[in-house]
Image (cartoon, grey):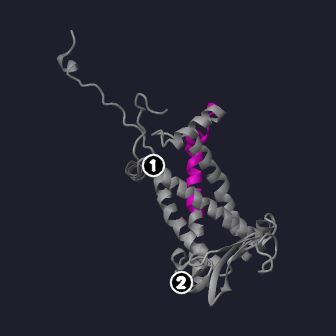
Amino acid sequence: MANAADSQISPQPPAKPPPRHSLLVRLTHWLNVLVLLVLLGSGLQIFNAHPALYWGHASTFADPWISMTAEPRGQGLAGITQVGGLKLETTGVLGLSDGMQRGFPAWATLPGYRSLAEGRRWHFFFAWLFVFNGLAYLAWGLFSGHFRRDLTPQRRELSPRHLWAEIKDHVALRFPHGRYNVLQKLIYLVVIFGLLPLMVVSGLGMSPGVNAAWPWTFEMFGGRQSARTIHFLSALALVAFVLIHVGMVIASGPLRQLRVMITGGAISPPKPGALS
């Protein structure tokens, strides 16, 4: 005969699902938001000191690949942005804004007024903060198995049929919850192991002190000016990634996404009929 007390024991509650994002991921994510904003603004301040880009060792306005200047037009000046052989008038945005000749407008730079010295101080300090923050995330991702478990695509996910289905779901703004889809995995891997290291190494390739110790940091790019160009282009690519990322967050439910990235959220089992 069963004990009466035993019959009154309630079943164990279901185990609490694991967090969607660990504490370290959330901390490094929000620190990167601040760091990248400062790096972008201070980087544009540094760029404005010489608003032109080159390939190789040339560093004069004789043959720039990209330049932002002001040219006489009528009774005044016009901002001109040159990309290769193409010239565009960009008065008020690039080349000439607020009546001053400058590459990017004051509202986009840090500080807003012209100061190469301050821009460099902000940029170098936050660049090292960005590196150490990235190394912490990288170490955690490797040792915790996060990259292998969450970001490594499965073979079936790389099939053309599956990739095409994921693309159609994104176009239709249908996003799976509680997991990374294959497009996210591929983009995150490219950014983490390709774009970000390229931006860091090309940045080091512009530092005379680093060049003296490790000449390969600029020689691998074909010169300091090429390193500067690649650094600028990789920064633009990162800005594009962030804008797309923010757009996807808005499209898939900004309040829920922000709550998950702040509190950690939880990985819940998929509901019947939900994307898996």
Residue at figure coordinates x 49%, y 50% from the top left: 248
How many residues crowd mark 2 within 10 Å: few (<14), some (14–19), many (20+)?
few
Is 31 inside the magenta-drawn segment?
A: no
Residue at figure coordinates x 61%, y 40% from the top left: 152
Is 141 inside the magenta-drawn segment?
A: yes
How far across and how far down the image is residue 74, in percent?
Answer: 65, 88
**Eyeballing the image, is 172 above or below 129?**
above
How far across and how far down the image is residue 72, in percent?
Answer: 67, 87
How far across and how far down the image is residue 193, in percent?
Answer: 65, 52
Q: Are marks 2 and 1 in contact (CB under 8 Å)?
A: no
Q: Residue 79: in sight, yes or no? A: yes
How far across and how far down the image is residue 15, in percent?
Answer: 37, 33
Name the amino acid type tagged 1: Ala
The residue that disc 1 covers is 251
Q: What secondary structure characterizes most of the magenta part?
A: helix
Give 54 or 120, whichever is nearer the viewer: 54
Give 264 or 235, whichever is nearer the viewer: 235
**What residue range appears in magenta?**
131-156
How many residues crowd mark 1 within 10 Å: few (<14), some (14–19), many (20+)?
few
Name the amino acid type tagged 2: Asp
Give 72 or 122, whichever is nearer the viewer: 72
Q: Secondary structure under badge 2?
A: loop
Nearest to N terminus: mark 2 or mark 1:
2
Q: Is residue 38 left or right of residue 50?
A: left
Residue at figure coordinates x 80%, y 63% from the top left: 220
Q: Mark number for residue 190?
A: none
The residue that disc 2 covers is 98
In this view, the residue farthest toward the bottom is 75
Q: Is residue 143 left or right of residue 225?
A: left
